[in-house]
Amino acid sequence: MLTFATPADETQAAQLLQPCLIRVVDNVRKHTETLNWRSDYLEQVRWPGDATPAQRQQVRDLAAQLEAASPAAAETIRQQLSQLPTPLPGYELRLTQGPGTTEEPRTATLDLWDLCFAVCFTDYRPGQPVTVDPTLIAPDGEIDWLTLDQKAKSLVERAIDQATAAV
């Protein structure tokens, strides 16, 4: 869960996060096309750090009940869910390089949201309050697309190169 350093950071992040994610995914595609690694996207569920296993199970059970619930029952279930930790969607990039004659396949995994956050925020560290990178906002308050593209490309290439070199 993101904690913003200021209300202005939260406002600017609302403007930037979707474009950052799009630029990250596009640069992942471009960079992985130059590698001999297969890339797969996996959807993950990200739970807040304080969510207990019992709460996670309760949320899954209530979500399953919600699908078949009557309108009155659905409202009660939504109320119960609002009192529990809410999972967020997460996306992983899994890179796999086929096995050689005597080796197992090599696999590297990257969290796409962490890459997106690294693009959007200055000095992003999970669990720390975030500040929007001011270079991504032009003087007129609009997104500086050139800077966003350059930063996304640089961070994506570095992350993929480091991940694939480490395995």
Image: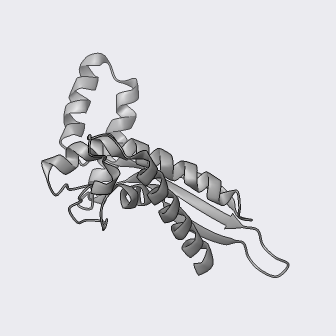
Q: x, y percentage for residue 94?
A: 59, 61
Instruction: For residue 5, say whether it is visible.
Output: yes
* 45 up-or-down from 126: above or below: above
Seen at 48% across and 64% down, the residue is: 155
Name of the residue lying farthest toward the front: 139
Color theme of the render: one colour
User: Which quadrant does the C terminus fall into?
Assistant: bottom right
Q: How many marks?
A: 0
Residue 93 is situated, as x and y percent measured from the top left of the image, at 55, 58
**x, y percent for residue 31:** 63, 59
Q: Is residue 150 left or right of residue 32?
A: left
- Identify the residue shown where x is 27% and y is 55%: 134
Query: Looking at the figure, which quarter contains the N terminus?
Result: bottom left
From the viewer's perspective, is 62 left or right of 110? left
Q: Position of residue 39 (x, y in %)?
A: 65, 57
Residue drawn 65% across the image and 59% down it:
32
Pick out the residue farthest to the top.
71
Judge by depth and name the residue closer to the eye, 73 or 135.
135
Q: Is residue 145 above or below residue 105?
A: above
